[in-house]
Image (tube, rainbow, N blue to C red):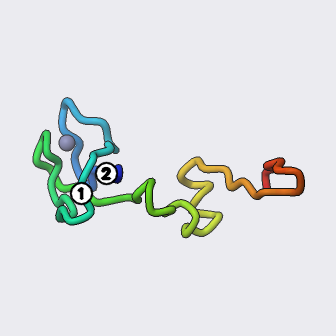
């Protein structure tokens, strides 16, 4: 089952992290509200759909990712 990552768009519930991950079936609707605090949330990306690869490098940097590219001999280097 894919893991989806959501972010609170306005307030964050007292017992919530600003972002959280949740297992959902592909067929499940996108959450509009946090299942814990009920405040509005939006989906960030799905780990299983290669979402990070589709993001622009500047956006990746913003999210704290470092894009790695495969070089010869299976060595990964920072691009
Ligand atoms: Zn919450």
Pointers 2 and 1 in contact (C-beta within 8 Å): yes
Rendered location of residue 12, percent (x, y) = 23, 42
Q: Nearer the viewer, residue 12 or 35?
A: 35
Residue 39 in the figure: left or right of residue 22: left
Nearer the N terminus, badge 2 or badge 1? 2
> Residue at coordinates 45% horizontally, 63% vertically from top-left?
49
Find disc 1 in the rendering and name its residue.
25
Q: Nearer the viewer, residue 15 or 73?
A: 73
Rendered location of residue 9, percent (x, y) = 27, 55
> Residue at coordinates 15% horizontally, 54% vertically from top-left?
33
Residue 76 in the figure: left or right of residue 27: right
Residue 25 in the figure: left or right of residue 66: left
The quarter of the image that holds ligand 1 is top left
Characterize the local packing of mark 1: few (<14), some (14-19) or many (20 or more) Cα atoms within 10 angstroms: few
CA gap, disc 2 and disc 1:
6 Å
**What kind of element bears circle 1?**
loop
Q: Quadrant of the C terminus?
A: bottom right
Q: Nearer the viewer, residue 46 or 10?
A: 46
Rendered location of residue 18, percent (x, y) = 32, 42
> Residue at coordinates 83% horizontally, 48% vertically from top-left?
75
Q: Nearer the viewer, residue 58 or 77?
A: 77
Find disc 2 in the rendering and name its residue.
1
Vertical placement of residue 15 versus 23, above or below:
above
Characterize the local packing of mark 2: few (<14), some (14-19) or many (20 or more) Cα atoms within 10 angstroms: few
Residue 44 in the figure: left or right of residue 28: right
> Residue at coordinates 10% horizontally, 47% vertically from top-left?
38
């Amino acid at each position: 089952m894919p893991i989806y990552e959501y972010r609170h768009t306005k307030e964050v519930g007292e017992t919530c992290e600003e972002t959280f991950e949740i297992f959902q079936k592909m067929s499940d609707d996108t959450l509009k509200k946090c299942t814990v605090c009920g405040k509005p949330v939006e989906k960030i990306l799905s780990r299983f759909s290669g979402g990070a690869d589709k993001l622009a490098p500047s956006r990746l940097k913003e999210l704290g990712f470092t894009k790695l590219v495969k070089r010869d001999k299976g060595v990964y280097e920072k691009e």
